[in-house]
């Protein structure tokens, strides 16, 4: 490169995720707009309304702007501020993970998918993320298991890959104190429909031993990540040996090929989930967890807390 230059000089951009896809350098920055709001400790002066995707073929070459990939105004659950994002590639698909504040000013992490690194990116139902749509799934939202105040405010997300293993990284804030931040790393798995979901527990490299139908029988805590305005708290369910579930009416479970299927309320909600071992931080032991998506594109989490 002959001399330093601004790669993007027509927009205010920061916090880029940078990847090489198809022999091009792709840049996924946040995009700030001059709001006229005085700077303060709450970050109210940041007005990040959308994402643009950029690429370049050589370090001295031109930068191509593909336009808006995601827009806050078109996301029904959005409040404000699309912070720094990241992108992961798997099996011919590109997944864009984005932190966004809800209408109560709390961050959640959403995900969108595309066949091309530049987009267009789509939600669970095939809606263009640059146009009005449902804009789920959400990878994580404010939640809490029993024995812990819970977590909220997930932002500054990143994706890691180690061979065939994927990991989600972000900041998180205690539900009881939004000013106390922690680093979260979660195992990322992929549903049979090809969507990413994360473990409900922070990552510890516990042994992945065989899980059988008999080992699923017992007492579980289950969380539906459906609310973007209130805490998603766990409920206690009993997974019985006969395949029924006690705790939600007319519900059942089945297990095959490492996929746990949960049918709640007579089929009103059906969650296809991956199942694995992880560390139960609240009860300080290794346990079995599941993570999946419903037919409405909402995340469902669970962890086993005891056997019968």
Image: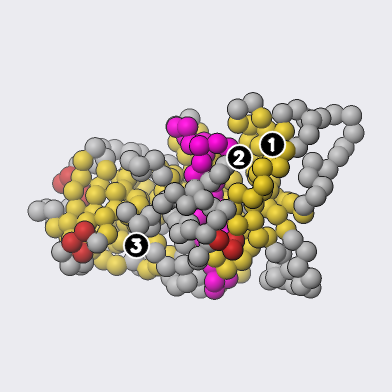
Nearer the observer, 172 or 133? 133
Indicate which disc, 2 or 1, sits on the residue closer to the N terminus: 1
Rendered location of residue 269, percent (x, y): 27, 59
How many residues crowd around disc 3 within 10 Å: few (fewer than 14), some, or many (20 or more)? many
In the picture, residue 55 is in which quadrant?
top right
Q: Is residue 137 left or right of residue 49?
A: left
- Give the main secondary structure, helix, strand or loop, of the magenta stretch: strand
The magenta stretch is 89-117
Name the residue at the front extreme: 131
Indicate which disc, 2 or 3, sits on the residue closer to the N terminus: 2
The number of numbered discs placed on residues in the rendered structure image is 3
x 63%, y 62%: residue: 81
Q: Is residue 104 left or right of residue 192?
A: right
* 100 in the magenta segment: yes
Rendered location of residue 125, percent (x, y): 41, 51
Residue 303 vertical position relative to residue 105 in the rendered view, above or below: above
- Mark 3–mark 1 contact, CB under 8 Å? no
Q: Is residue 125 left or right of residue 118?
A: left
What distance separates the C-alpha of mark 2 from that of mark 3? 34 Å
Q: Nearer the viewer, mark 2 or mark 3?
A: 2
Q: Which residue is mark 1?
A: 55
In the picture, residue 187 is in which quadrant?
top left
- Mark 2–mark 1 contact, CB under 8 Å? yes
Can the viewer see residue 155?
Answer: no
What distance separates the C-alpha of mark 2 from that of mark 1? 8 Å
The secondary structure type at the circle numbered 2 is loop
Q: Which residue is mark 3?
A: 223
Q: Which of the numbered marks, if any, corresponds to residue 118?
A: 2
Nearer the observer, 153 or 208? 153
Can the viewer see residue 116?
Answer: yes
């Amino acid at each position: 490169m002959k001399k330093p230059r601004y790669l993007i000089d027509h927009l205010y951009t920061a916090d880029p995720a940078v990847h090489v896809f198809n022999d091009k350098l792709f840049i996924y920055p946040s995009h700030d707009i001059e709001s006229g709001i005085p700077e303060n400790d709450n970050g109210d002066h940041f007005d990040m309304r959308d994402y643009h995707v950029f690429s370049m073929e050589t370090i001295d070459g031109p930068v191509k702007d593909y336009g808006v990939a995601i827009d806050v105004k078109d996301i029904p659950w959005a409040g404000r501020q699309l912070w720094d994002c990241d992108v992961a590639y798997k099996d011919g698909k590109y997944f864009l993970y984005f932190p966004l504040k809800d209408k109560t000013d709390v961050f959640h992490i959403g995900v969108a998918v595309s066949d091309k690194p530049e987009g267009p990116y789509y939600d669970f139902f095939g809606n263009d993320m640059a146009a009005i749509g449902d804009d789920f799934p959400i990878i994580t939202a404010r939640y809490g298991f029993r024995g812990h105040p819970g977590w909220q405010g997930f932002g500054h997300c990143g994706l890691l890959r180690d061979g065939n293993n994927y990991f989600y990284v972000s900041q998180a804030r205690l539900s009881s104190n939004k000013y106390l931040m922690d680093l979260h790393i979660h195992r990322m798995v992929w549903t049979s429909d090809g969507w990413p979901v994360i473990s409900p527990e922070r990552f510890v490299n516990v042994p992945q031993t065989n899980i059988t139908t008999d080992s699923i029988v017992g007492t579980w805590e289950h969380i539906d990540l459906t609310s973007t305005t209130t805490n998603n708290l766990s409920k206690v369910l009993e997974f019985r040996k006969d395949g029924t579930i006690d705790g939600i009416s007319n519900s059942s479970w089945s297990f095959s090929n490492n996929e746990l299927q949960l049918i709640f309320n007579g089929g009103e909600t059906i969650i296809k989930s991956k199942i694995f071992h992880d560390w139960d931080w609240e009860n300080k032991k290794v346990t079995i967890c599941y993570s999946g998506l419903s037919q409405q594109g909402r995340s469902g989490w669970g962890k086993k807390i005891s056997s019968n």
